[in-house]
Image (cartoon, grey):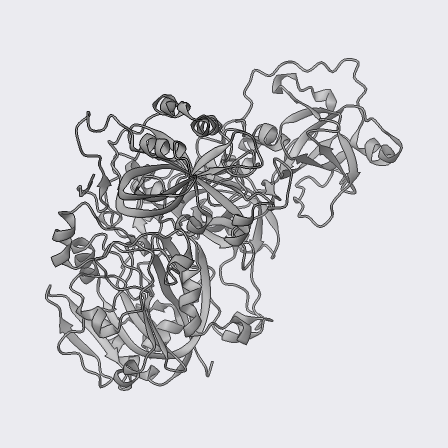
Amino acid sequence: MLAELGNSSTPSVSFEGDAEERDKSVLVSLLEQLTNSTVLCPVFLDTPELVVVVSIQRYLRDPGNEEGSQSASGYFFDVTVTDQISQVKCHLAPVLNSLVHWNCLRVGRGIHLTRCSLVHDEKRLNRCFLQIEALELVAAECNPSLSIPSPSIEPLRSLTTSQRGRDLLRTLQMETPLKGGRLHYLPLWNNNDPYGREWAGPKTPPFPNVPLEGLGLISLQHLSMTWRAKVGFPHLLVRIMHKSRLRYYGRPQTKVDFPYQAYFEVADQSGMMPLVLWNSLCPEWYQSLHVGTVLLLHRYSVKQSYQRRTWATPCDPQIKSLRTIEICLNPRDPRAEIQIVPPQQVKAEWRLPDIKYNFITRLELDKLPEGFTCDVIGLVIFVGRCQRIRKEDSSEDFYSYRWVHAIDGSTEQPFVLELFATSQPETFQQIHPMTYLVCTQMRVVRELRPSGVMLNVPYLTTSNESQIFISGYHKGQPYTKDPKVQGFIQWVKGQRENDVMKRSVIGGYYSFPPAPNLFQEYCKNLDAEALLTSTSELKKEIESLHYREHKRFILQGIIVAVEYICHTDLAARLKAFPVQEVDAFVGSSSQPIRHLDSPEKDTRVTRQTEQLCVNPARRHQRQSTPVFNRYSLRPAAVQDADVAASTKGFSPGAELPVPPDKDDHGRCNAGNSTDGNSKYTWKSPTWSEIREHLSEHLHFGQLLSESIPQRFVYKHRDFLMQQHNLQAAVCSPVPAVSKMELQSFASACCHDYYTVTIVGVNHQVAVDVVFLPVLMSRDSHRILGLSMEVHDNALASVMASGYICDKQTADNNQLKEMPSCQDQIIKTAADLDNTRVICILDVYHHGEGKSEVILNKVYRMTD
């Protein structure tokens, strides 16, 4: 079995051999070996067999499981693999969970199983499963033409000759998690989205007619006054006014099968009251209960409401608020009865309140106060990549979010929207430029700095009660009749598609809101010392990041070197070396590294990283053997900068080779590389001496292709959305343009950049980072929020402001064009020599050992 290189930047997995050779499933052979063994012990595979990951499923750890607690993880993973004949669901040993956390182990990836075991569930009868104890990751993706068998038990019938085989077969036929007693899986990257077959889709018409004649109805106001004196409550006829995102409250010690809840607010002619959908009713009903839906409720319970929750902001002041109690819909004791009243059966004499909104235009936003709640509609022109932040510092639970810009024609300025996942994955994952976006219950953010200066550009962020709708989901929504929505539709009809396409951007590095001008304002009321991270801690902090996690760090140190990388130089590098990416913490290695089952087996196992960068002389040798490029679990010591520079294979994480005419005398030098591209550099006179005594040098100074925003191409929208969304949990057909590399799309902005070397104040650790300043006339989507005051284009000013000026003030106070030549900017770098600075770093983990570290802003200590 070999991995073959295709036209794609990433190899694809293929299975070699004729049909007769592959008639026998390697997975079945492995299972037969395990089930027929007289001694239950792990099996080491001398010749690891190649399989492909079909799906990865996550679920809550069982409260009584000791193995999970030892792995310090609250979740388990089941991994389904195929050998192109059989498909088997396996449990991933918890010590390998980090492979999923870093997206090294993912669907479509080829893996070699090197150690497996058969595990019995001693708390349940006749249950056992295959557990992956150790594996090797093949540096290859599943070939799109590779046939993935449909789940079938037929290839595994041979296992029925033993009791263990029959137990295994019985377990594999179940769709519940393999380990422990959990009944359902969770989304792979957050806990707030509906996921799995248990979640019923929206109930579709025709709905059965609801008989209301003879029912004793009670109003919400009457219920609020008499609920303590009643045991059984009459029917309620209400309309849903607001809907919250799902809340998952599961913990390892939680014994509830479906620990979910969802808040709604419902109303009748007498007032509005909160309603809570509990536990297993959430999978059954959540996706069928929409704003505007009319419900007939019975066998509900009532209790005092939980006041420490967020509340939707009513748009109709005439509706009386009845928030002291809440209606509870429970799956048992008693089980609530829920009926959707068909829209055609709703009568005016019921006097149910209409759904009202508070839509604003972008022009009106500038006058609104902090915390104001509103609804917006706009045409999307920028969609940022999906990012994750932890709910708590040491938590495994994350929020998913992305930044979006949308225009509505009231002004040239777009809405800046911070959109967190709203339990609408079908919408959140499909947001792209050129779509019509509606966001409800958004909160205005207008940060007031301690100096009294208001944030230059306000933005909107989602609340727990926000709902998001895009093109294809607007039909039948109550807001379609709103006057401002109608006005937006008329404005869109007058727009030219090509004009909007020119402004449409997707992905890349994006930071908002901009950091304030003064460090004291950045810290606000927080202790500045508590915010600082030492350079010696930075490596560990970056290693701890999970896939697509974003985190900001503050370092103090001195800048000792700056190098300007021009656009053509970057393009040449990306073209020549499309996917050779290496972890910044490890050097190149030609040795295949196994993923051990336990850190105790090899004390050097501290991080799984992809090792795709190899010496060109060795690359040919390795392609001629069955052992192919694999991931490395061995952390190697950070290579000395001189050693890294001498590596023949290109490594984006390594320090760039120094041109012959660079010197260490603190002067700017313009040199020509072998491809004819100019480079401008500056190095402090003390850098050579400091460099000799460093204990570590972290290399993150190469701009990744994923950091570059791209022009949106509508016909390739599926591919572009796939690239900027989170990795799927289940293998699915790849878009037709899957072999197209990200860098083949036109860049949305000039991606010239600087590599900046920062040394900690103790001169022990240095780190190379990317500085990507905004160009005033070109980076339109990144310019929002910046003060854009004219400065002298000295490097210190550029790093402090975040942008390069195109104009300067002349003697008559008029703006005139000014040169922004990079050699002139680099020459001013000497002003930073031996100057203590505070650096704001944005760190983002792309997965597979790739981390993006970008210098956001620099403060001088004198500031």
Left or right: where 469 falls relative to 31? right
x and y percentages locating residue 4 in the rendered image: 18, 41
- Quadrant hosting residue 657: bottom left
x and y percentages locating residue 424 in the rendered image: 51, 37
Q: Residue furthest front?
A: 38
Q: Residue at x 52, y 27 (%)?
A: 201
x and y percentages locating residue 441 in the rendered image: 59, 44
Q: Judge whether residue 792 can be spotted in this image.
A: no
Q: Residue at x 35, y 60 (%)?
A: 852
Frontmost residue, 634 versus 847: 634
x and y percentages locating residue 741 in the rendered image: 24, 46
Left or right: where 188 falls relative to 817? right
Q: Residue at x 29, y 33 (%)?
A: 26
Left or right: where 511 falls relative to 559? right
Q: Residue furthest right?
A: 229
Frontmost residue, 377 versus 506: 506
- Marker count (numbered): 0
Frontmost residue, 687 versus 569: 687
Left or right: where 522 falls relative to 46? right
Vertical side of 285 occupied by 746: above or below: below
- Quadrant hosting residue 718: top left
The N terminus lies in which quarter of the figure?
top left
Frontmost residue, 76 versus 520: 76
Q: Judge whether residue 51 can be spotted in this image.
A: yes
